[in-house]
Image (cartoon, rainbow, N blue to C red):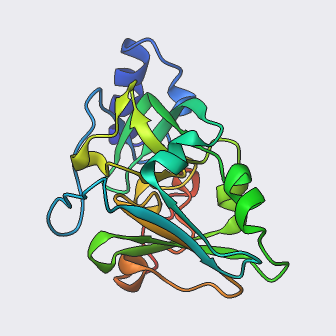
């Protein structure tokens, strides 16, 4: 076993967790590190909108109160960053894709989701990733409104993938028939981003 892995697993075990929860190449942190491209986006709740468009029968635009009025789900999940930290038992509250799908009615041609965020940031995931029960459009974290430095007012949470696939400062979900690489994917990050397979980079 590599030395890093043995030390990382020992820390997890000492903290009272099952080391099997830690993907390869990761280490456990109790903190929530702040990482993003560019500056922190300060979004005005009064003008924020979530647009759902593309391969849908009905284009939908929701303001913050309309999003919060939809049936909510709370999850506790582990999250994993490509920079090698993992945080266990992170709490999020938000709306599952299934609720949004009732409003926009995806077309049969919809196979991918392009997440749009402030400053033109995008990332891409299969629609099936959003359909998992652990995925949310989140507006709360750990029982509080989502902090701006962690993507507030609203971010995607797709916890079974490296966390750059969970766009901060989310403002659009574009359903697409074909995949389209986003910001980090164009810079050489792996398109699939499975932490259990260490799919960090494309090279």
Q: Is residue 189 in view from this perspective? A: no
Q: Is residue 200 in view from this perspective? A: yes
In front here: 115 or 89? Answer: 115
Instruction: Count up the numbered dots.
Output: 0
Identity of the residue drawn at 17% across and 59% down: 40
* Residue 56 in the image, given as x and y percentages of width and height: 73, 77
Identity of the residue drawn at 57% across and 30% down: 74
The image quadrant where one finds the C terminus is: bottom left
For this view, does 111 lie left or right of residue 190? right
* Residue 65 in the image, given as x and y percentages of width and height: 46, 46
Q: Quadrant of residue 26?
A: top left
Please determine whether, in this image, residue 65 is positioned above or below residue 46. above
For this view, does 64 lie left or right of residue 194? left
Please determine whether, in this image, residue 133 is positioned above or below residue 182. above
Q: Quadrant of residue 128?
A: bottom right
Please determine whether, in this image, residue 162 is positioned above or below residue 178. above
* Residue 164 in the image, given as x and y percentages of width and height: 40, 60
Identity of the residue drawn at 30% across and 53% down: 45
Identity of the residue drawn at 25% across and 57% down: 44
* Residue 174 in the image, given as x and y percentages of width and height: 57, 76
Please determine whether, in this image, residue 47 is positioned above or below residue 95. below
Q: Residue furthest right?
A: 108
For this view, does 69 lie left or right of residue 166? right
């Amino acid at each position: 076993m590599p030395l890093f892995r043995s030390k990382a697993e020992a820390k997890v075990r000492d903290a009272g967790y099952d080391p099997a929860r830690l993907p390869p190449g990761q280490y456990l942190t109790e903190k929530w590190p702040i990482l993003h491209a560019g500056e922190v986006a300060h979004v005005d709740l009064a003008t924020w909108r979530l647009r759902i468009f593309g391969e849908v029968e009905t284009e939908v635009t929701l303001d913050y109160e309309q999003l919060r009025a939809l049936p909510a789900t709370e999850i506790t999940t582990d999250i994993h960053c490509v920079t090698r930290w993992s945080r266990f038992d992170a709490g999020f509250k938000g709306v599952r894709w299934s609720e949004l799908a009732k409003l926009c009615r995806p077309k049969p041609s919809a196979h991918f989701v392009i997440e749009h965020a402030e400053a033109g940031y995008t990332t891409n995931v299969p629609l099936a990733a959003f359909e998992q029960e652990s995925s949310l459009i989140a507006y709360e974290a750990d029982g509080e409104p989502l902090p701006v430095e962690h993507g507030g007012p609203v971010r995607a949470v797709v916890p079974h993938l490296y966390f750059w696939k969970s766009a901060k400062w989310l403002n659009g979900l574009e359903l697409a028939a074909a995949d389209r690489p986003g910001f980090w994917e164009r810079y050489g990050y792996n398109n699939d981003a499975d932490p259990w397979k260490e799919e960090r980079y494309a090279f």
